[in-house]
Image: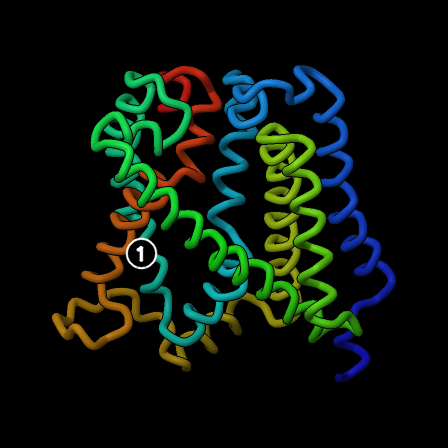
Amino acid sequence: MDPQHKLGIVDYIIIIISLLIPSVIGIVFRFSGGKQKSIKEYFLAGKNASKLPVIMSITATTLSSIFMIGAPSEVYRFGPLYCLFAVTLGVGLLIVSHIFIPVYFQCNVSSIYEFLELRFGKLTRFTVSTLFTLQMVLYSSCVLYCPAIVLNAMSDVSVEAAIALCGCICTFYCFLGGLKAVLWTDVFQTFLMLMSLLALHITGIMEIGLNEIYKRASAGGRLHVLDFSPDLTKTYTIWNTMMRGMGLAFGFYGTSQIQVQRFLSMGGCKKAQS
């Protein structure tokens, strides 16, 4: 690889800091506050989590490595139509906020699986929790693999070493600090991702300018936002993109344990809805 495209000393320092801070957060929450001695403290952050860390944590789970690496390539190849799912996602989140979340708090459950047992029985709870565990194993594998191949392409770190390092650190701070450590680590990681995106955009604008960016995007046919074609074989149309937004709202934010756990950690329905 061209040496200019290799990571420098500053890059390695940032990577090391980004790996050390989550570990420190895990240790801090293990030996402070409730010290993770109860189920409510460990899995639900004592049910008194503040809005800011929960919002940032939800953002972090959305902006996974798959999204950060995959979404730009999708927009580059298929155009900005990909981003329109955010419109119906917003509508779907309003429905989740006013229909799904109140039900969870009214049933006084600590997980989506407790609700499923109350509503449908133990067999449903067992089946869904088993499938979710399998899904998370596969999903986590992809989430770890994506940054590993990027790090391998930009440095001398092997894919296997990168996967092992990231996996061990994530396991370490989650195991020690519970949900509180997860929430505040997500705050740090979200800030880091947003600052990285901002730096990337500023660098791009400074190097070639907004006019040139527009010209290149237009020449490449990447400014076609609306496609009302009923063709089911097309990768993105306005119809399947809008449906994707609603599906993401209900399936990921409304019924996934990943997000429901964060909503429940705030301890009150009104607080979670806001």
Rendered residue at 40%/33% (across/down): 260
Residue 255, x across and y down, in percent: 32, 39
Q: Is residue 144 above or below residue 38?
A: below
Left or right: residue 99 versus residue 158 is: left
Residue depicted at 24% across the width and 31% down the height: 121
| Amino acid type of the residue that numbered disc 1 sits on in the rendered structure | Leu
From where the camera sits, is residue 203 visible?
yes
Asked whether residue 274 is in view, the answer is no
Outermost residue on the bottom side: it is 1
Looking at the picture, does residue 98 appear above or below residue 92? above
Residue 249 in percent (x, y) is at 31, 44
Q: Nearer the viewer, residue 219 or 112?
A: 112
Location of residue 79 (image quadrant)? bottom left
| Residue that mark 1 sits on | 84
Residue lying furthest left in this view? 230
Q: Quadrant of residue 65?
A: bottom right
The N terminus, quarter of image = bottom right
Label 1: which secondary element: helix
- Residue 7 falls left or right of residue 129: right
Tell me if 184 is positioned left or right of 90 in this view: right
Percent across and percent down for residue 61 are 50, 45
